[in-house]
Amino acid sequence: MRSPKAVLASILEISEDSINDASSPENVAAWDSFNGLMLISALEKEYGVKFNIEEVVEIKDFRDIKEALKKHGVSMVE
């Protein structure tokens, strides 16, 4: 299982080293609305979870992704 950072890096085609908790659509050029949807789909597939619409709307940055995964019982290593 890949780390959330690896999933994000793969979808956005950026290096894992460039990702931190504050990484968001506001400061990562490749994180547009389409890639945001692709990211949610990839995370759901990778971790076997299903985010509801409220969770998706609340995800604003990488920190929020980790928190949403934790709510679904996903423990992760970075």
Image (spheres, rainbow, N blue to C red):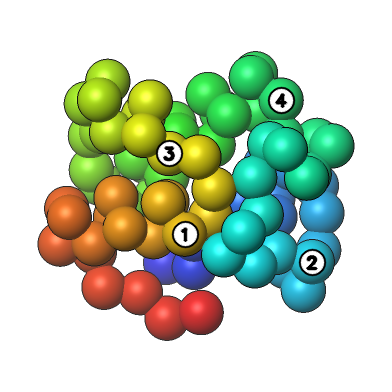
Say left or right for 54 vs 7.
Answer: left
Dot 1: few (<14), some (14–19), or many (≥20) neighbours within 10 Å? some
Of badges 2 and 3, nearer the viewer stands 3
Name the amino acid type tagged 1: Arg
* Cα–Cα span, label 2 and label 3: 19 Å
Dot 3: few (<14), some (14–19), or many (≥20) neighbours within 10 Å? some
Secondary structure category for the residue under label 3: loop
* Cα–Cα span, label 3 and label 4: 13 Å
Q: Residue 59 carries which label?
A: 3
Whole-percent x, y for residue 9 in the image: 70, 55
Whole-percent x, y for residue 35 in the image: 65, 28
- Mark 4 = which residue? 32
Secondary structure category for the residue under label 2: helix
Q: Residue at x 27, y 20 (%)?
A: 53
- Mark 2 = which residue? 18
Q: In which quarter of the image is residue 29?
A: top right
